[in-house]
Image: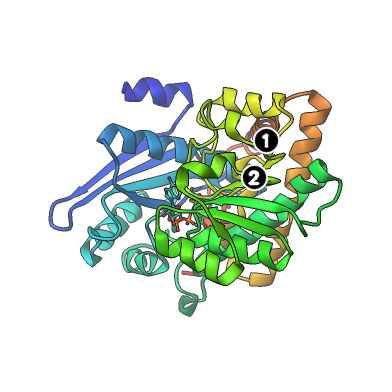
Amino acid sequence: MEIFKYMKKYDYEQLVFCQDEVSGLKAIIAIHDTTLGPALGGTRMWTYASEEAAIEDALRLARGMTYKNAAAGLNLGGGKTVIIGDPRKDKNEEMFRAFGRYIQGLNGRYITAEDVGTTVEDMDIIHEETDYVTGISPAFGSSGNPSPVTAYGCFVGMKAAAKEAFGTDSLEGLTISVQGVGNVAYHLCRHLHEAGAKLIVTDINKEAVKRAVDDFGAIAVNTDEIYGVEADIFAPCALGAVINSETIPQLKVKVVAGSANNQLKEEKDGDELHERGIIYAPDYVINAGGVINVADELNGYNRERAMKKVEQIYYNIEKTIDISKRDGIPTYRAADRMAEERIQKMSKARNQFLLDGHHILSRRKH
Ligand SMILES: NC(=O)C1=CN([C@@H]2O[C@H](COP(=O)(O)OP(=O)(O)OC[C@H]3O[C@@H](n4cnc5c(N)ncnc54)[C@H](O)[C@@H]3O)[C@@H](O)[C@H]2O)C=CC1
Ligand SMILES: CC(C)CC(=O)C(=O)O
């Protein structure tokens, strides 16, 4: 991988490699764009096949956060961290303390939170070393685990997409296939079950599948069967790149709407969904609930205010569908347009020199 060439292509600001021998920390912090404010994005811990795969994931996820935060109306830029390792075996206190010091060294340019493989407890350890961390325990007056809020945002976003596809935003009686029933999707399944939807689920983790079957009467299928099942909506809630040239021809659904980041393997896969008349709820628009929730901590966390903002995801999905129809473009392009326009307008509105410019972190009570 030619790193500078890649960074230039998508205009990344900074890539930080963090190594700590004692704890085994190997982390990559990617900061994509801080036009709107400090870069906020979670930390993913995962066993990557190669260092290159980890760098690429950090970069792709960081850029997604720029678009997510902009589309959600947050005054935040985009960044993300990946830690190379197995979250079940390789974690230790020293690792997150060392990582926290690296974040502190960035002096507020990057703020972290949870993602796949990291927990509220990990964020609490990071918080021992830096204030630039969110999603910490409610005991600190913070917002805690973002996953249930991400799930709620996905639920309301799915309703908006369903309205376009089925003429009503009621999910009652619909069949929804869910890939991955982890932290976010378990709560999404709960909302869907309560709304009267039928669930088909899969996961590589058999216990996660059993929980969804026991708690919500879900039907379990093998991981390779989920794409081809008869359903109304497909909710990808595991990892990225699952919407691709191999899986799209198998889909029998009218809507794709789930929490996973970077669902489209390539842009052409978004074009293909559009051509097939499948409504795609752009990933970074529908899964913004978690970041909206943790971002509220920067103002002194207020759950009611945060949840009101999360409910806007319904209208943000409607807006992407409206732009898509108005301009005759796929929804993923409509979402990009929405986010890019906001970044461009704000950079123009905020370009005059201020000696001690006000920004979101100046409101934070540490
Ligand atoms: N946690 C949050 O608040 C947010 C999460 N997301 C994204 O949503 C997705 C899910 O996140 P979490 O629920 O937090 O992660 P998680 O790790 O708790 O859940 C993911 C689940 O997917 C399963 N899985 C992995 N590969 C699979 C495969 N090939 N087939 C079937 N199942 C598979 C895992 O076993 C796990 O149960 C990720 O892409 C994450 O980046 C996005 C925004 C916020
Ligand atoms: C989990 C969130 C709090 C932030 C994030 O990294 C995301 O939305 O993907």
In this view, 215 is above or below 89: below
Q: Quadrant of the N terminus?
A: top left
Q: Kindly identify which residue carries mark 2.
A: 285
Q: Is mark 1 within 8 Å of ligand 2?
A: no
Residue 57 in the image: state x and y as whole percent: 39, 38
Camera sees residue 32? no
Q: Kindly identify which residue carries mark 1.
A: 335
Horizontally, is 123 left or right of 334 in the view?
left
Camera sees residue 310? yes
> For the residue carrying disc 2, how many other residues have a C-alpha within 10 Å: few (<14), some (14-19), or many (20+)?
many
Q: Secondary structure at mark 2?
A: helix
> For the residue carrying disc 1, how many other residues have a C-alpha within 10 Å: few (<14), some (14-19), or many (20+)?
many
Q: What residue type is disc 2 on?
A: Val
Horizontally, is 212 left or right of 94 in the view?
right
In this view, 297 is above or below 43: below
Q: Secondary structure at mark 1?
A: helix
* Sequence-first tag of 1 and 2: 2
> Residue sitting at 38 percent across and 59 percent down?
118
Residue 331 in the image: state x and y as whole percent: 70, 33
Whole-Å distance between the Cαs marked 1 and 2? 7 Å
Q: Which mark is residue 124?
A: none
Question: Relative to the observer, which residue lies in front, 83 or 247?
Answer: 247
